Amino acid sequence: PYGWYREMRENEPVRYDPGRNSWDVFRYADVKRILNDDATFSVDPEKATDFVEPEGEGEGLILDTMLFEDPPRHDDLRGVVEDSFRPRAIRELEPRIRELTREILDDALEGEGEMDLVSEFAYPLPVVVIAELLGVPVEDRDRFKEWSDAIVSSASDDEGGAEFAERQQEVQREMGFYFLQLIEERRENPRDDLISTIATAEIDGEPLPREEVLGTCILLLVAGNITTTNLITNAVRCFGENDLFGTYTDAGAVPTPAIEETLRYRAPVQAMTRIATEDVTVGGETIGAGDRVIAWMGSANRDDRQFPEGDSFVPDRSPNQHLGFGHGTHYCLGAPLARLEAEVALSELFDRLAGVEFADARLQPTRSSFIYGVESLPLRYSV
Ligand code: HEM
């Protein structure tokens, strides 16, 4: 998409797209302004003039969450889990994440010189980590992973057929039912896990309604999986293309700025949607109340007005105020966790592998315009 972004930033930085019935915004300053102003640019899809109620139960599981609520409800819901995701709390997870990473890597390395980085390494890791944090019992992990797979296939598929949609609904129902049981159980006997935290939370002395408890659990499950998978994979692509594999093996650790630069250069989430709550002018264009606005942070991240040589990968770029985790009120809750997982995963990977190379130059991008990554990344390596 990057050639297109560049062209749009220069020629039509704010434009109406009749096909999607929405506005596209491409420049850094405009994107940041939109994310900063949640009174004018709401996350609530129901505020759109052309909003249609999703059909069927289960469809809207994550509509009742912080991601689609404006303040003040947003702040209350986010407050329920915020402490668990603070950098200090997350740092304590490092030894366990390293252990899980090594287990997954051991399995992946059984391929004797070849592996698919996505399916064998970058995908399983975040699923296992979040399952453990939530408190999903070990014996249910396989079922749990099947649901994640199904949800991921929906996230990367823009227009599946009717059969596909039906299967999705079934998965959502099954998963919802499963979580509700777990939630009830933890309400009675809370443990030291996220499901317990959410199930026993109170806002202004009132327990959370069931839909919000369930929605929050499911949001935590889905928000961090394909995104973290793609961060790890996109980083390996960036490092390979810039001849950095050897560098990081010697150092034994992948430096933070290189991960930040990946979040800028190949952001796993390329765009976010908002609804204008009043008529508002952006870049000389008037966006009407109730219009949908797509803030292209994948483009903002390449804007030369903010990043010198925006289309070059500079592993030690500083400063680097990228929008890879969003900005403002909805800034990614899981950012500290995603950063830690990526740092541990990449460092362990390069520590174990020598002579890494891409085994297949043909890359199949994920089938979604908002999620950026590849479906698979075959590697050849020696140990
Ligand atoms: C929000 C990206 C990992 C949980 C967001 C947003 C972005 C983002 C761009 C803002 C959405 C918006 O403004 O509409 C990413 C990327 C990740 C990642 C690129 C990995 C590299 C995670 C993880 C978790 C997580 C691991 C949790 C386990 C959330 C939640 C929100 C969010 C709960 C909503 C926050 C709110 O509305 O206040 N993420 N995310 N994310 N993310 Fe992440």
Image (cartoon, rainbow, N blue to C red):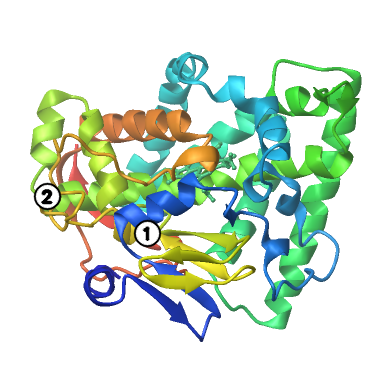
Mark 2 residue type: Pro
Mark 1 residue type: Gly
- The percent coordinates of residue 14 (x first, y second) are 37, 71
- The percent coordinates of residue 258 (x first, y second) are 21, 37
Query: Residue drawn 76% across and 53% down?
Result: 61
Front of the two marks 2 and 1: 2
Q: Tell me: 377 left or right of 122.
A: left
- The percent coordinates of residue 320 (x first, y second) are 23, 38
Q: Tell me: 211 left or right of 75.
A: right
What is the CA distance from the residue labelled 2 to the residue labelled 1? 24 Å
Residue 234's place in the image compared with 23, above or below, is above
Residue 6's place in the image compared with 265, above or below, is below
Q: Is mark 2 within 8 Å of ligand 1?
A: no
Tag shown at residue 373 = 1
Query: Residue drawn 60% across and 21% down?
Result: 84
Tag shown at residue 308 = 2
Verify CB contact (< 8 Å) between mark 2 and mark 1. Answer: no
Mark 2 packing: few (<14 Cα in 10 Å), some, or many (20+)? few
Q: Is residue 98 visible?
A: yes
Q: Is mark 1 within 8 Å of ligand 1?
A: no
